[in-house]
Image: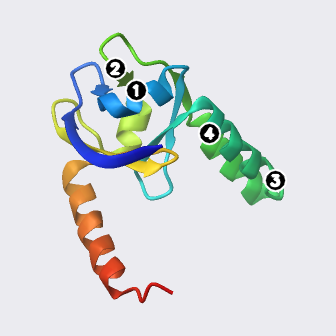
Amino acid sequence: MFLGEYFHSLDDKGRVVMPSGFRRRLEDGCVVAKGQDGQLTISAVEDFQRRAADVMERPQDRGGRQFSRTVFGGADLQSLDKSGRVLVKPDLREFAGLSSGTEIAVVGVFDHIELWPKDTYLQDRAQGDDTYREEDGA
């Protein structure tokens, strides 16, 4: 499982270091994909395959086909390099607003990892904390 938040820089080649605790789960490959909140997700291959099964169960009307194209057409199969880095393709960096040389948030969300521009993530986290405090726990 992936837990915690970390802040790393995206290097000039578009690579980001995965926290050491995340690497073992990704050693057999990972999928970098678009997230529905404008972030990127990184999943172990088998976790992405489970998500893919859910996507394929959607009705295959025009909207379902478009959703499938967005999920699968935008996804990229990657492997960690020797330094534990994942390459993020330029089109995915553009989608998420990630720029080389800037700090990004690497966030463990149980079965996947999310990549965000640091400032965007901190803003989203603050909103989430406020909402969390308001929940009654039911």
x and y percentages locating residue 119 in the rendered image: 19, 55
Question: Mark 2 and mark 4: span between their CA atoms?
Answer: 19 Å
x and y percentages locating residue 65 in the rendered image: 75, 50
Image point 25% across, 57% down: which residue? Answer: 120
x and y percentages locating residue 59 in the rendered image: 83, 59
Q: Which amino acid lies under the numbered mark 2 shown in the image of this protein? A: Gly
- In the rendered image, which quarter is residue 131 located in? bottom left
83 vs 64, nearest the viewer: 83
Q: Do the residues labelled 2 and 4 touch (CB within 8 Å)?
A: no
For the residue carrying disc 2, how many other residues have a C-alpha within 10 Å: few (<14), some (14-19), or many (20+)? Answer: some
For the residue carrying disc 1, how many other residues have a C-alpha within 10 Å: few (<14), some (14-19), or many (20+)? Answer: some
For the residue carrying disc 4, how many other residues have a C-alpha within 10 Å: few (<14), some (14-19), or many (20+)? Answer: some
Secondary structure beneath disc 1?
Answer: helix
Secondary structure beneath disc 3?
Answer: loop
Image point 21% across, 21% down: which residue? Answer: 12
Instruction: Return the disc, 4 or 3, that comes first in the chain's sequence.
Output: 4
Q: Do the residues labelled 3 and 2 touch (CB within 8 Å)?
A: no
Would residue 89 be seen by someone viewing this image from the given angle? Answer: no
Question: Mark 2 and mark 1: span between their CA atoms?
Answer: 7 Å
Give left or right: position of 30 versus 134.
right
Instruction: Return the disc, 3 or 2, that comes first in the chain's sequence.
Output: 3
Q: Where is mark 1, residue-wise?
A: 23
Q: Which amino acid lies under the numbered mark 3 shown in the image of this protein? A: Glu
120 vs 27, nearest the viewer: 27
Q: Which amino acid lies under the numbered mark 4 shown in the image of this protein? A: Asp
* Camera-side mark, 3 or 2: 2
The disc at residue 84 is: 2
Q: Where is mark 3, residue-wise?
A: 57
For the residue carrying disc 3, how many other residues have a C-alpha within 10 Å: few (<14), some (14-19), or many (20+)? Answer: few
Instruction: Return the disc, 2 or 4, that comes first in the chain's sequence.
Output: 4
